[in-house]
Image (spheres, grey):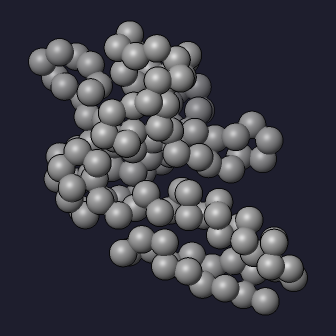
Amino acid sequence: MKVQVKVSPKVIVEAEGTTQTTIFEQLASMQEVFGQFGQCGKCKSDELQFIVREDDKKHKYYEILCRKCFAKFGFGQKSDGGALFPRRKETENQSVMQGQLEAGAKLPDGGWTRYNLQTKKSE
């Protein structure tokens, strides 16, 4: 059995499985990630794109970038298989918002951040 669901104005996902629960779990996971691809949390633009960055230590960073105001929405990666999840809270080792929020605090603008050149911090 296959199911297609429109999770945002620009994204349709497809899940396949033999049981409804299997398909439901797949759709829930995909909607949590790809449902963020609607509009920027800072400027409300729909000019968004998926970005995958890699640092010199080969760590990959999965983000959605607003092409209008250059805000980013980051995703974390689960250690047990690599599934992505939206980053909406400050973590102990997160470089975004460093020093501005305590671990576990909700990020402003639903998790969307933009680097401020003047203050040299993400906000």
Q: Is residue 1 left or right of residue 105?
A: right
Question: Where is residue 97 shown, x and y percent of the image?
Answer: 36, 21
Q: Residue furthest right?
A: 18
**Residue at horizontal 40 percent and vertical 25 percent from the top:** 96
Rendered image quadrant of residue 114: top left
Give the camera-side residue of 61 and 90: 90
Quadrant of res 113:
top left
Left or right of 1, for residue 97: left
- The residue drawn where x is 81% and y is 71% is 22
Q: Is residue 104 visible?
A: yes
Indicate whether 96 appears above or below 65: above
Single out the residue that lies furthest toward the top.
99
For the question of whether residue 53 can be seen, the reply is: no
* In the depicted structure, whether residue 19 falls above or below residue 49: below
Q: Position of residue 86 (x, y in %)?
A: 52, 45
Judged from this view, the residue extending furthest toward the left is 118
Q: What is the quadrant of the N terminus in the image?
A: bottom right
Q: Residue at x 29, y 48 (%)?
A: 41
> Residue 39: image x %, image y %?
29, 59
Report the residue at 52% width, 17% height from top: 103
**Whole-percent x, y for residue 23 in the image:** 75, 75
Up the image or down, 90 lies above or below 62; here it is above
**Quarter that holds the C terminus:** top left
